[in-house]
Image (cartoon, rainbow, N blue to C red):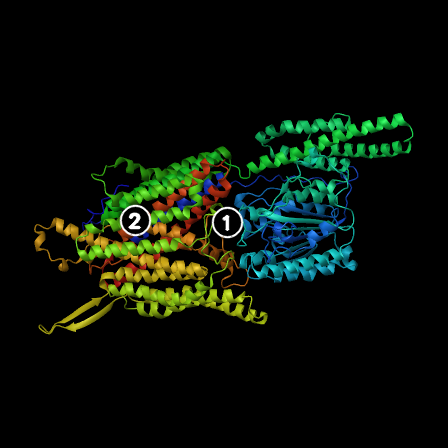
């Protein structure tokens, strides 16, 4: 990055710019609009690059539109149904150990030994009750898991984005097969089911699913409706009942699993299950399962062991679920077991999607076409005949799906295993079977053979007296059993192997799209560098360069893009293709045109300067760290180390300052900044991979609630934080105009209101609070949040916009001359004091949506920013004095006190902006987030709302998650405005410097996003790609768009309105 050394960059920008004589079609656009256009162009490049890359990297799973044909007399089921009805109860986030008889050691009194009915019935009726640990394929969010347990298919990583707004399932599913079989289906509970299967249920009682603050409404709704249907008089009105309880999941999100609230909720579920079991008839199968698990904080969404360990319980009053037959190890070795963490007894382990083919066969409906699950063998273990037919019917269904899927690599990898399975079939049936992908002919033939074999066995037993015939039949029976065992083993192995291969293709990759997306993102970094260098080197004439560069770039790319897009449209006969090709081509060519001059002007710096290189060096270190999964896992520590590097360097270079006062000030500010940053970095939550070397400090202990000392601290902190701003402004006499009222009364009141909201939120779920008081607390909390939002989005912006500058005008009479003198207090920081009031508006809304410890962290970040602004300003003053000494013919005659540093402007450097970028990352981690889905704080969606409200709830979650990045982007222009004095009836390059800083800031984030994208694509077959690299890329992509939006708002509103106020007051034009 070619830029002048900070220590030599002291020349004063020209007060009067050279008039632009550009013939550009952009010549009529004002400088402010021109800068806004540049930022919109950069944002569009990021959008295009991220979209193209994501389409290649996170392709959705191929859904086959085929449907398994219904059973008819000519196409009978392979096995007779064992049950005609079923009750399916989903207890959201029911983790395995919540029902397992084998508790982890030591057991928790809050969730172990509470929901005991499954283990009790399994102990007393082992043939009628089965408990499993069911592996929930990540992402472990409700919508994806409902898809899995109804279709038997695998989710894709990008599906997580649909969790706020579920879309209908159009592929073949257990629900659609039940409907085709004329089954009457009743549903009650989580409304995600109603969204996924609209107009499907004959009986439907949906409830809102996202209000994690509500622990009981959905559960009570399910209880209210399900028990009347289970009464004997109403059991003819339905064939399948589905109930989805949400209370356990909401308790986990609200307080975690290690609180008494969880014990109470599990006790309620235990009583519900007891009553359901009492009301069941002998022809009804009960299925109880969790859609996913939860971690120690009650969160889920990722692939941690506790999140994917969900419980499953099958119970039948009538026909037994487990046969009496004993199978040898050759068959049972594929019946996996699982030992829950800290437990010492194994539990049967299955894939959660295994319930799909199992339920289908037990209820007598076809297995859904896209199913990849394997039948649960215990449910068909009456004899070898039944197990063999069930296993093979399942394998044939998967083979049909693979044939339609059409992936040649998978077909080739599995062809030998399928051939072996079919060979065993030939041995079993004693007649060759074609290796076709037809429906169920092979299974039906085997079914006939089984029936004939059973009849023959009965006849043989009647004539047992004939010894020779009996021996022959015994030999034949042993031989057939051998072949059946081989068939069971081969077909089950094939089914499991198919699932393993398709899991490897969880998300497919399109290398052309990945390369094009990476190229656009990579060139966007170079484009930003080119614009940064051009704007910087052209000084106050930056607009001349920008107009010419943009016109050349846009004109060239528009012409070539139109030609290439038209040809693509003609070739494909698709207008949509022409548009897509035009957009991508326009982006690529415009970037190339802008970047090309950069390589024509490369110059080698004359001397090494740590100030020049430390910023790019830190960016390089941060970007290259994404090549290592370990560095990504510990990124919260990495960015903390990178950020503290800069104040340490400033501390070491403090002795070069020209005056003792400056040296002491730089030392104190550097130390203060380093210390407060280290304190901020000490607040964190832990990734699963960081254990046991990480300790959670964001929450209290193992529960996702704030420590009590934090709750006591946030209100006093809200009262005192405006004082910190005021003390800073007093130094430049800028605590004037609207600032005292804005800070001392209005802003302080909103901060206290924000803190009060979280105190009420804690009190609402306080175990010692009387239940009758809770509704009142909830109502007060709701309106406290709404009042804060109203003031923040209404009163604060209005007052800031209509208020004058933060200055005081004093008129005095000169006693010697009698002339009137006008003194303007706050003049030296006119720009900065006005802009910082604007910055506090978005800070307030992020402060509201942040949890108590997050509010403490944000307050500390704000103080650190004030310290950093003063540190950089002091260093600039030092540079100005050093330049003055160097340029003066007689340094001994200079009166330091007479030098007005406020009238000399030092151009910002890239290194200046690096700490602002890094503080955004530290704020992200220290406000309770990591680059994993499970760290999303969903409760923020309900701040000010009782239910999920679009689009506000998603916006609140985004602000909670990425608020620190958003705030860091808004503070960027302040670096170029702080302690800058207007030049009355002249001009000042604040637009130029603000744009330089914004471009430097975007260089940092664009490089990070490009690096995370490239490393994720390069390591796309890495074991950790979906656990580490892909989530980090998605986080980077969202962050990049957030900071793009932030800098656009900062410049088009904050900088422009501030410049307009200054121009209106002093006649000083910002250029």
Can residue 996 be seen by looking at this rendering? no
List x then y, in percent, for residue 162. 54, 49
Can residue 678 be seen by looking at this rendering? yes
Task: Please indicate whether residue 506 sits to the left or right of residue 457 in the image.
Answer: left
Checking the image for residue 646, the label placed there is 2
Of the residues under marks 2 and 1, which one precedes in the sequence?
A: 2
The answer to whether residue 91 is above or below residue 372 is: below
List x then y, in percent, for residue 701. 49, 57
Q: Nearer the viewer, residue 296 or 797?
A: 296
Q: What's the CA distance linking mark 2 and mark 1?
A: 31 Å
The answer to whether residue 934 is above or below residue 809 is: above
Mark 1 nearby-residue class (10 Å; few <14, some 14–19, many ≥20):
many
Which residue lies at the image location 37% right of the left edge and 43% below the top edge? 622
Which residue lies at the image location 46% right of the left edge and 37% below the top edge? 1017
Checking the image for residue 87, the label placed there is none
Identify the image quadrant of the N terminus.
Answer: top left
Are the residues tagged 2 and 1 within 8 Å (C-beta)? no
Q: Nearer the viewer, residue 864 or 683?
A: 683
* Closer to viewer: mark 2 or mark 1: 2
The residue singled out by tag 1 in the image is 933
List x then y, in percent, for residue 180. 72, 46
Occupied quadrant, residue 1058: bottom left
Task: Please indicate whether residue 959 sits to the left or right of residue 237 in the image.
Answer: left
């Amino acid at each position: 990055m070619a830029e002048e050394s900070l220590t030599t960059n002291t020349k004063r920008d020209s007060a009067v710019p050279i008039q632009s004589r550009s013939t550009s079609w952009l010549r009529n656009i004002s400088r402010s609009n021109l800068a806004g256009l540049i930022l919109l162009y950069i944002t569009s490049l990021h959008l295009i690059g991220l979209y193209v890359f994501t389409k290649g990297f996170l392709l959705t799973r191929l859904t086959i539109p085929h449907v398994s044909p219904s059973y008819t007399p000519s196409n009978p089921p392979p096995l007779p149904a064992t049950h005609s009805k079923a009750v399916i109860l989903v207890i959201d986030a029911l983790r395995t150990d919540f029902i397992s008889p084998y508790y982890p050691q030591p057991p928790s009194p809050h969730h172990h030994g509470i929901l005991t009915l499954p283990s009790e019935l399994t102990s007393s009726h082992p043939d009628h009750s089965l408990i499993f640990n069911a592996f929930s394929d990540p992402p472990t969010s409700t919508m994806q898991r409902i898809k899995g347990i109804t279709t038997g298919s695998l989710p894709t990583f990008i599906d997580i984005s649909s969790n706020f707004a579920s879309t209908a399932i159009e592929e073949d599913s257990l629900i659609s097969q039940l409907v085709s079989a004329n089954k009457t289906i009743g549903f009650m509970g989580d409304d995600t089911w109603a969204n996924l299967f609209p107009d499907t249920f004959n009986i439907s009682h949906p409830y809102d699913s996202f209000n994690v603050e509500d622990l009981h409404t959905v559960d009570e709704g399910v209880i209210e409706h399900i028990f009347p249907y289970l009464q004997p008089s109403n059991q003819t009105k339905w064939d399948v009942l589905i109930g989805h309880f949400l209370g356990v999941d909401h308790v986990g999100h609200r307080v975690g699993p290690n609180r008494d609230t969880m014990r109470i909720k599990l006790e309620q579920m235990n009583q519900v299950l007891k009553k359901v079991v009492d009301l069941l008839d002998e022809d009804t199968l009960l299925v109880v399962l969790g859609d996913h698990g939860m971690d120690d904080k009650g969160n889920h969404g990722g692939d941690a062991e506790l999140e994917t360990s969900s419980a499953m319980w099958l119970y039948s009053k009538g026909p037994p679920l487990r046969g009496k037959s004993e199978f040898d190890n050759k068959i049972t070795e594929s019946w996996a077991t699982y030992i829950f963490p800290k437990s010492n007894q194994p539990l049967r382990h299955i894939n959660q999607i295994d319930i799909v083919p199992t339920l289908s066969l037990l209820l007598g409906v076809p297995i859904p076409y896209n199913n990849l699950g394997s039948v649960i063998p215990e449910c068909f273990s009456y004899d070898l005949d039944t197990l063999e037919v069930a296993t093979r019917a399942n394998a044939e269904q998967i083979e049909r799906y693979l044939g339609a899927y059409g992936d040649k690599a998978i077909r080739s990898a599995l062809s030998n295993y399928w051939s072996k399975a079919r060979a065993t079939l030939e041995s079993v049936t004693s007649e060759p079977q074609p290796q076709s992908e037809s429906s169920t002919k092979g299974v039906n033939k085997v079914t006939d053979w089984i029936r004939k074999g059973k009849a023959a066995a009965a006849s043989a037993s009647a004539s047992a007296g004939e010894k020779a015939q009996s021996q022959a039949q015994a030999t034949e029976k042993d031989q057939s059993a051998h072949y059946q065992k081989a068939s069971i083993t081969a077909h089950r192995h094939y089914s499991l192997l198919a699932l393993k291969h398709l899991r490897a293709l969880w998300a497919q990759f399109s290398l052309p799209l990945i390369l094009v997306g990476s190229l656009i993102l990579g060139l966007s970094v170079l484009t930003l560098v080119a614009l940064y260098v051009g704007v910087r080197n052209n000084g106050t004439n930056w607009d001349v360069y920008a107009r010419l560069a943009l016109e050349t770039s846009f004109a060239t790319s528009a012409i070539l893009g139109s030609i290439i897009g038209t040809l693509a449209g003609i070739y494909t006969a698709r207008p949509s293709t022409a548009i897509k090709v035009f957009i991508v081509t326009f982006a690529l060519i415009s970037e190339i045109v802008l970047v090309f001059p950069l390589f024509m002007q490369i110059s080698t710096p004359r001397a090494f300067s740590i100030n020049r290189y430390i910023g790019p060096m830190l960016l390089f270190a941060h970007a290259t760290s994404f090549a290592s999964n370990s560095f990504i896992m510990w990124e919260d520590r990495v960015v903390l180390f990178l950020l503290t590097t800069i104040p340490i360097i400033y501390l070491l270079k403090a002795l070069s300052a020209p005056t003792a006062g400056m040296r002491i000030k730089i030392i104190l500010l550097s130390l203060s900044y380093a210390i407060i940053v280290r304190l901020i970095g000490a607040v964190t939550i832990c990734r699963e991979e960081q254990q046991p070397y990480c300790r959670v400090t964001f929450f209290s202990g193992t529960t996702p609630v704030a420590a009590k000392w934090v709750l006591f601290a946030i209100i006093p902190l809200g009262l005192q934080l405006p004082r910190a701003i005021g003390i800073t402004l007093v130094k430049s006499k800028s605590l004037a105009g609207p600032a005292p009222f804005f800070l001392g009364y209005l802003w302080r009141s909103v901060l206290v209101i924000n803190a009060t909201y979280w105190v009420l939120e804690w009190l609402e779920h306080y175990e010692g609070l009387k239940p009758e008081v809770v509704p009142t607390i909830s109502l007060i909390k709701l309106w406290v949040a709404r009042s804060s939002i109203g003031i923040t989005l209404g009163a604060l912006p209005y007052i800031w916009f209509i208020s004058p500058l933060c200055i005081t005008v004093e008129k005095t009479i000169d006693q010697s001359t009698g002339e009137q003198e006008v003194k303007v207090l706050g003049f030296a920081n006119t720009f900065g004091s006005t802009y910082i009031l604007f910055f506090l508006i978005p800070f307030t809304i992020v402060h509201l949506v942040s949890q108590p410890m997050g509010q403490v962290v944000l307050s500390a970040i704000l103080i650190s920013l004030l310290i950093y602004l003063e540190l950089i300003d002091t260093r600039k003053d030092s540079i100005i004095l050093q330049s003055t000494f160097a340029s003066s013919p007689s340094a001994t005659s200079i009166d330091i006190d007479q030098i007005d540093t406020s009238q000399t402007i030092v151009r910002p450097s890239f290194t200046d902006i690096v700490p602002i970028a890094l503080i955004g990352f530290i704020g992200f981690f220290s406000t309770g987030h990591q680059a994993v889905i499970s760290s999303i704080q969903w409760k923020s969606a309900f701040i000010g709302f009782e239910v999920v409200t679009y689009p506000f709830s998603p916006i609140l979650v985004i602000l909670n998650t990425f608020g620190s990045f958003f705030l860091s982007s808004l503070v960027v222009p302040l670096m170029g405005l702080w302690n800058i004095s207007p030049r009355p009836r002249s001009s000042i390059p604040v637009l130029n410097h603000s744009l330089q800083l914004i471009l430097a800031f975007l260089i940092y984030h664009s490089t990070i996003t490009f690096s995370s994208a490239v490393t994720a694509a390069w390591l796309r077959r890495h074991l950790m790609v979906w656990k580490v690299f892909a989530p980090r890329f998605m986080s980077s992509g969202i962050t990049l768009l957030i900071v793009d939006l932030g800098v656009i708002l900062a410049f088009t509103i904050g900088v422009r309105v501030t410049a307009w106020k200054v121009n209106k007051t002093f006649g000083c034009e910002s250029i």
